[in-house]
Image (cartoon, grey):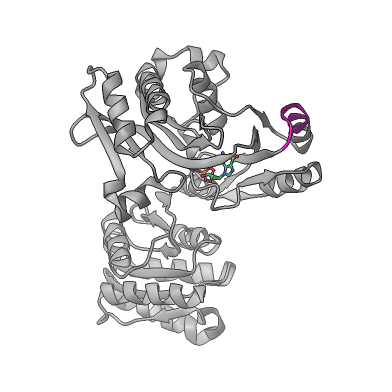
Amino acid sequence: MRLYEYEAKQLYKQFKLPTPESMVAGSLDEVSKAVDKIGLPVVLKAQVLTGGRGKAGGIKRADVAGQVKSLASEIFNKTIRGFPVEKVLVEKAVDIKQEIYLGITLNRADYKITVIASAEGGVDIEEVARKSPEKIARLEFDIDEQFYDFQALGLAKKIGLPSSKLRSFASIALSLFKFYKSYDCKLAEINPLILTAGGEFICADARVSLDDDALFRHPDLAEKGIEKRHEEGELTPREKQAREWGIPYLDLDGDIGMFPGGAGYGIMGNDFITYFGGKPANFMDSGGGPSPERIARMLVLLDENPNVKAIFGARFGGISRCDDFAKGVIIFLKDHGLSKPMAMRMTGNMWQEGVRIFEEAKKESPELFEKIEFHGIETPIENIARRAVELAREASG
Ligand code: GDP
Ligand code: MN
């Protein structure tokens, strides 16, 4: 179960991890009250169960009273990676000298608790890992092993902190480790851990994921107002909609809508798109012998996703037949209309009939098909993937 930042910080505080003074607000009024109490400057932070809020405009600093309401309402009106913003954390702004990364997670490959630190904090740690892996320091522990003082000091040294800061960093790392184990975490992250101009460390962000199977060991969470969220609560609105329609669907963070056949074909499609330098916006499976209506709804999910720039529509007819597929696409074109360019091809079970239905409908109302680039059976799937990547690039200019 993923925690909201404000929930995670509440738990961090209990473990003596320093966090800025903050209050959570559910309305503009509450934001104003919080600002009165905390005092300017403040940072307003969208509370959503996803990262990268900064980049998405979900984090704003207010220096003067006149800015507060308009900045807060901008954030409340946002949807970040599919999550509407219902709460905003009002937090005392921090004077940043350096941003550090500190995180603890379970390495599933070797069952070790892994403590990760880097002097290049604030940004995506995956990005740092890719570009400059030498800037990341790691320590691994068996589940019953202790994290000793000297190891924490060594970690601080390894990321290049000055000797005057080693001890205070070490104590934060040790506290986070204690927290991690006490609450059966899967992930506990502080990014950024800010070193202030005044020379103090403060946890500016908090990301925590708890092991659902161990939640029963922590009845105190409910007393703190941290209720067990249904898995549903962690689905994006589009994923929820897909679930209601019986479509296995996952939002990803790219810009190519994936409209494949079965799950295997979908995985292969996502691989091809990535291979050609594109990024899928979703993973989807048609959910076994889908009706034309369900096919149509799959396209609704993609066409209404503002992140989608182009659609990959290569279909292999297995149990789900190409004629049903063609009918579904046509229902969608007539009822909804396609606003994104789509590269298409169909092959497999009943493909001739599918193509015939398609061409007949196109003769009748060619305007519906304007956005579709239809390829013949001789075009291999990889070429469709390459075209989808090109179409997405053209669409983003
Ligand atoms: P995230 O984008 O969802 O990871 O949210 P963060 O809380 O990590 O904030 C993103 C970035 O905002 C940080 O890495 C800082 O560079 C920047 N920032 C600037 N001033 C402040 C501040 O006073 N407090 C916090 N939390 N972040 C600040
Ligand atoms: Mn962060």
Apparent side of residue 41 relative to residue 293 in the rendered image (left or right): right
Measuring from the top left, give residue 216's x and y in whole percent: 40, 15
Q: Is residue 6 above or below residue 262?
A: above
Measuring from the top left, give residue 121's x and y in whole percent: 43, 43
Q: Is residue 173 above or below residue 304?
A: above
Q: Quadrant of residue 266 in the image?
A: bottom left
Task: State the residue lying farthest toward the left.
Answer: 110
Q: Residues in magenta?
A: 33-40
State the quadrant of the N terminus. top left
Q: Residue at x 30, y 32 (%)?
A: 155
Residue 16 or residue 250, whichever sits in front: 16
Measuring from the top left, give residue 275's x and y in whole percent: 28, 66
Residue 18 or residue 86, whichever sits in front: 18
Does the magenta-highlighted stretch encompass residue 34? Answer: yes
Q: Residue at x 30, y 78 (%)?
A: 352
Q: Residue at x 45, y 72 (%)?
A: 392
Residue 300 or residue 63, whichever sits in front: 63
Task: State the residue lying farthest toward the bottom.
Answer: 363
Residue 105 is at least partly visible in this image: no
Apparent side of residue 320 relative to residue 240 in the rendered image (left or right): left
Q: How many marks?
A: 0
Q: Is residue 125 above or below residue 164?
A: below
Residue 87 is at least partly visible in this image: yes
Measuring from the top left, give residue 39's x and y in whole percent: 74, 31
Apparent side of residue 179 relative to residue 116 in the rendered image (left or right): right
Task: State the residue lying farthest toward the right.
Answer: 66
Magenta stretch, main secondary structure, is helix
Does the magenta-highlighted stretch encompass residue 185? Answer: no
